[in-house]
Image (cartoon, rainbow, N blue to C red):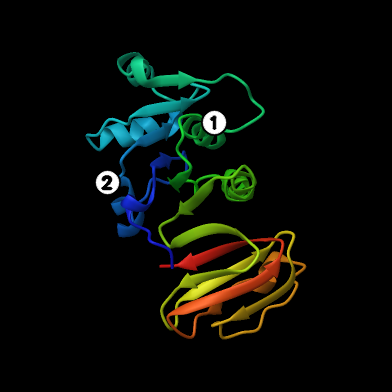
Amino acid sequence: MNDITAKAFDAVVVAGGDYPTAPQPQEILSGAAFVVCCDGAADRYIATGKVPDAIVGDGDSISPGNREKYTHILHCIAEQETNDQTKAIRFLKERGMHRIAIVGATGRREDHTIGNISLLMEYMREGLEVESFTDYGYFLPCKGTTTHNSRKGQQVSIFNMTARRLRADGLLYPIYDFTNWWQGTLNECTGDSFTIEAEGEYLLFVNY
């Protein structure tokens, strides 16, 4: 498993899904060097007694009071071709931050959850290293052959995007060129690391 401490990231994005409650995403958020809230998530973050470094989005979700109070850090981007999560990621990219954690991107609306998760592949194609942390585990976009630290019995799911010749070492069940997302779910690590071999792209979900 990758280093999931806040120190591993240039910045953390707080998205507009369920606010994180598990220790892992909370630790990442509390130790972040730079925090960007998608505009709807800013109210919940500010309610914890903290102020983000920036609030980014189309400006339609933040409360009028916070919109006025924090106008100096509010960056409204009106275009509707991307969602607020992507606006926040590109805001950070423009400022030279490429290693980014996202929290709060899942829950509430399932269509937004699927969209937010799928966008991780787009960020990878833009040269960014972006991981999304939920209350249960984290999503990590990958391509080619990758090796990850783990522990025996830890669960991992592999979602095939464009990969061919999928093979694994260090997982309980063999993997292959999955044609449906469910086929790669609920695999299990057999030791302290696992390797995925592939030609192309795939998405990992690793349980804490």
- The residue drawn where x is 43% and y is 68% is 1
Q: Which residue is mark 2?
A: 30
Q: Nearer the viewer, residue 7 or 178?
A: 7
Residue 149 percent coordinates (x, y): 44, 72
- The residue drawn where x is 53% and y is 64% is 205
Rendered image quadrant of residue 74:
top left
- The residue drawn where x is 43% and y is 83% is 152
| Above-or-below relation of 36 to 60 | below
Residue 200 percent coordinates (x, y): 72, 61
Disc sitting over residue 87 in the figure: 1
Q: Residues within 10 Å of mark 1 (few under 14, many from 20)?
A: many
Residue 137 percent coordinates (x, y): 45, 62
Task: Tell me the quadrant of the picture where the C terminus can be found.
Answer: bottom left
- The residue drawn where x is 44% and y is 31% is 40
Q: Are marks 2 and 1 in contact (CB under 8 Å)?
A: no
Q: Is residue 36 left or right of residue 122?
A: left
Secondary structure of the residue carrying tag 2 is: helix
